[in-house]
Image: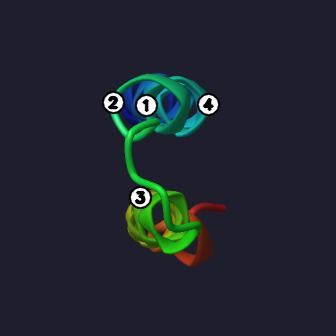
Amino acid sequence: MKEKISAIIIGVIVLAAFIIPFTLLKEVEKWYGSFLFWLILTLIVIVCNTMLIKDWSNEE
């Protein structure tokens, strides 16, 4: 169940990484508007993956 929820969250983040820069951030003239957004999303995905795999060493 935990893996399914994490996969859904990461899927939503990936979709947001494509949709938001071309819709909500299209008026931002500088490239770093989208870059900052992608950087934040990348950090969120890293945190999600870290939380997902932290218990893998306890499984037999």
Picture coordinates of residue 32, whole percent (x, y)? 51, 73
* Three-letter residue code for mark 3: Cys
Depth check, mark 2 against mark 3: the one in front is 2
Instruction: Between residue 59 and residue 48, name the one nearer to us.
Output: 48
Query: Which coloring applies here?
Result: rainbow
Vertical relation: 35 (above or below) 13: below
Q: Earlier in the sequence, mark 3 or mark 1?
A: 1
Q: Which residue is mark 1?
A: 20
Q: Which residue is mark 3?
A: 48
Quadrant of the image occupied by residue 31: bottom right
Disc 3 packing (10 Å; few <14; some 14–19; many ≥20): some
Q: Which residue is mark 4?
A: 18
Disc 4 packing (10 Å; few <14; some 14–19; many ≥20): few
Instruction: Look at the numbered discs 1 and 2 and tell me whether their residues touch, using CB distance below 8 Å.
Output: yes
Depth check, mark 3 against mark 1: the one in front is 1
Vertical relation: 20 (above or below) 54: above
| In the displayed structure image, the side of residue 17 where residue 36 appears, left or right | left
Q: Earlier in the sequence, mark 2 or mark 4?
A: 4
Residue displayed at 46% across by 36% down: 26
* Three-letter residue code for mark 2: Leu
Residue displayed at 38% across by 40% down: 27
